[in-house]
Amino acid sequence: PRFAAWLVAALADAVEHAHRRGILHRDVKPGNVLLEPAPNEPFGCTPKLTDFGLAKIIERDSTDQDTTASHLLMGTPRYMSPEQAAGRRDEIGTATDIYSLGVVLYELLTGVPPVVGGNHAETLQRLLLEEPVRPRQRTPAIPRDLEAICLKCLEKRPERRFGHASQLAEDLRRFLRGDTTHARPLSRTEAMRRWAVRHPVRATIVSASLLVWLVLLGSLVGYTRLLQQSGRRIERSLQEARAARMQAMTSEARLREMLYVADMKLAKRALDDGDLRQVTRLLETHKKHDAQSDLRDFSWRFLHNSSNQRQRLLATCPSDVYQIRFSRNGDRLAAACKDGIARIYECEGWSPVAEIETGQGELNGVSFSPDASRLATAGDDGTAVVWRVEDGQRLLTIPALPRLAFQALFSPDGKTIVTCGESPVIGLWDSETGESLGSLLGHEKPVEAIAISPDGRWLASASSDRTTKLWNLAELKLERNWSQHENRATTIAFSGDGQRLAAGTVEGNAIVWDVESRKRLLDVQHLDGVQSVTFSPNGQSLLVSDRSGAARLWPIDSQLAPLAQPDTLAWQAHEGRTWSAAYSADGEFAVTSGADGSIRLWRLSGAAVRVIRGSFANPFVDISIADEQLVTLRKDTGLRTRSLPGCETIQLVENHGGAWMTTCRLTPHHFIIGTEDGRLLLWDMEANEVVTEWATEFKSQIEAIRLSREGRLLAVHFYDEDTVTLFEIKHT
C-alpha cells in the first residue's frame, strides 16, 4: 500500500504539472507509466507518465467546438471516467485525469480495476451504473485512509473528486507521513442516498416497509392502558418480592442465631480443650460487622474474658523476643531479641533503661547476675558475653560453643556462668575471667535449656535427645537421668524453693516433679509444643506458654494422680509463638514475650475461676447460693452443699429413689426437692432423710420450684403445663 501511495502521488505531481500548462492527458493508465531506475528514491525508481497521444488543450471557451473529437470516444474503457464513458464532453476536465489516477491506485491496491466487463460496452455500462467494490472488501489489509483517498478519486460526479491533482498528491503524502487525510469514508446517510438513487425499486420497497412500521408503532399507542395494567402487576410483584426478601432476611437472621449458638458451644469445648486459637477464631466470627445485628451476649463475653486476660503492652520490638528474665529482686526485666539487642526495662513504670547491641547475631538467652549489676547474653555466634548493666560495657566474651548458644546463666553466687546450645556439652565458666571450669557430658544431642536450683546445688537440663537430666554442680557429675520423653524436651525450670522441677516437650507435655521423691505432681497436655515453663513465686502454680501463642496457668496439687488435668486459667498471649514467660516477684503479674515482637504484662491476681465439672450423663440441674453456701443438684447423684469461696463439700445427700430435678432451701436445715415424676420432697439435712412428701395432681417432671421471700408460698412449674401452680407452706 505504501508503494502504491508513493507511485500515484508522483503521477499526480506529473498530472498537476500538465494541468497547470493547460494539458489534459485523458488516458492515464499503468501502460502509460514507465519506471526509471533511481537508487536514491525511496523505492529505487522514478515513475514517468508517457503517451500524451490523447491529450488535449484545456478549453478556454466553452463555446469552442472540437469537431474532430465530438463524436469519438477516446481512451481506455476500464480507466475512463464516467463523464468520458458517457460522452459528456462539457464535463471532461482535470477531474477526469484524477479519476484515472484513482483507477491506477485501486488496481495497485487490489490487483484488479474497479470496474471490469466482458467487453468494452459492458465495461462502459457498469462504469456508469455501478459503484466500485470497496478496496478493503477485496483486500482487508488496505489502510482505511488509503481506501478513502482511492474512493474519493473514483466518485461518479467530478465535483466530488479532488479539485486538483496536487490535492491528491498531498493527501497521499499525508497518509505516508501518518497524518490525518482530508479524504473521509462516506457517511451512512450519504451511502443510503446514493443507494436509493441507483436502486429506486428497492428504495421504494424499503420506504413502504418503513411506513408500515410507523403505522404499527402508532397502533402500539392503543396498548398504553394494557401497559399501565402490566405496570401495576409489576408493582404488585415487586411488593411480593420485597416481602420475600424480608422473609429471607428473617430466615438469614435465624440462621445466624443458630450458627451463633453452635459456635459458642464449639468455643466452649475448645476452651475446655485448651485450644485458644480456635476459641479466638470462633469469637472473632461473631463480632459485629456493618449493619448486622450484634448477637453477642453473656456467653460470648464469658468465653472472651475466659480466653483473654487483662493486659498491658510493655514494649514492641522489631522482631521475635526469644527470652525474658527478671532480676533476682524483681526490679528489672531483660529481654533477648532476634535483632541482637538486649533490652532492659525498669519494672517500676516499665520504662526502658538500656539497649545493648551485642553483635552476637540473634540473641537467644539472657540472665542477670544475683546483684543485677551484670547481664549475660547468649547468641547465634556461639558466644556468651557479660555486660555491665550501668553503661552497657562489654566485660567478658566467652567462646562457649562452636555454633548457636541458647542460654547463659549466672549461678546463684554469681561466680559461675553455665552455657548450653547446639551441642550436647554443658559448659561452666568463671564469670570474672571467662576461664573454663569444666563441662558436663552425658547428652547425645543439643541441650535445649538449663536451669539452676536456687541453692546452686543442682543443674537440670533438657535435650533434643528426649531426656532431662539432673546434675550435681558441686561435683560436676550426673546425679541421675531424670526422665525419658517421647520427643525432645524444650524447656526446664526449678521452683523458687528448689523442691519442684518442671519440663516441657515439643509434643505439648508439661510435667512437674518433686525433686526429692521424683514423684510426678502434674502431667498435662497442651495442643501445641511447650515453649517455656515457669513457677509462681510460691511454687503452687505453673505458667506454661506454647507455640500456638497460648499461655496457661496450671495449679499444682501434690495429691493429684499423674495425668490428671485440673481446672486452669488460659489465654491467648501472642500472635504466633509465645517464646517466654516470667512471674513478677509478688506473683501478681506475669510477663510474656512472643514472635509478634511484643512484651506483655498480664494481671493474674483475682483472675482464677473455680470450675466444678459435671458430665453429660449426670449434669447439674439446679444451683443456688444462700448463707455463704453453694447448693448444687445433680439429676442422679443428689444434693451437695459447698462452702464459699473455697467450694469444699459440707454435706452430700445421695439420691436413692427417682431423679431429682430442682431444689430450694426452706430453712437452714431443710430443702424442698422436685422430682422427675412430679413429687415434692422435704429433706431434713440433719436427719439426712425425707420427712415429708407431697403428692401433686400432675405426674409430669417438675421443672422449677421457687419459695416466696416470707417462705409461705411455693411456686411450682411442671414440664407439661403452661401454668405455674402455687402451694401454701404451713410451718409447724
Image (cartoon, rainbow, N blue to C red):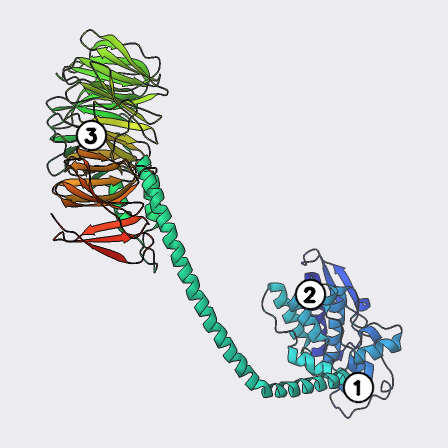
Tell me: 444 left or right of 219.
left
Q: Position of residue 537 (x, y in %)?
A: 15, 27
Tell me: 258 left or right of 159.
left
What's the CA distance linking mark 2 and mark 1?
30 Å
Q: Amino acid at mark 2?
A: Ala
Q: Position of residue 267 (x, y in %)?
A: 33, 43
Residue 582, which numbered label? 3
Residue at (87, 83) in percent of width and height? 72
In this figure, which residue is indicated by the disc labeled 1? Answer: 89
Figure check: 605 above or below 536: below
Q: Residue furthest bottom?
A: 63
Q: Position of residue 364 (x, y in %)?
A: 27, 26
**Residue 418, visible in the rendered structure:** yes
Classify 10 Å Cα crowding around label 3: few (below 14), some (14-19), many (20 and above). Answer: many
- Mark earlier in primary sequence (2, 1): 2
Figure check: 599 above or below 99: above
* SS category of the residue bearing label 3: strand
Q: Amino acid at mark 1?
A: Arg
Q: Quadrant of residue 470?
A: top left
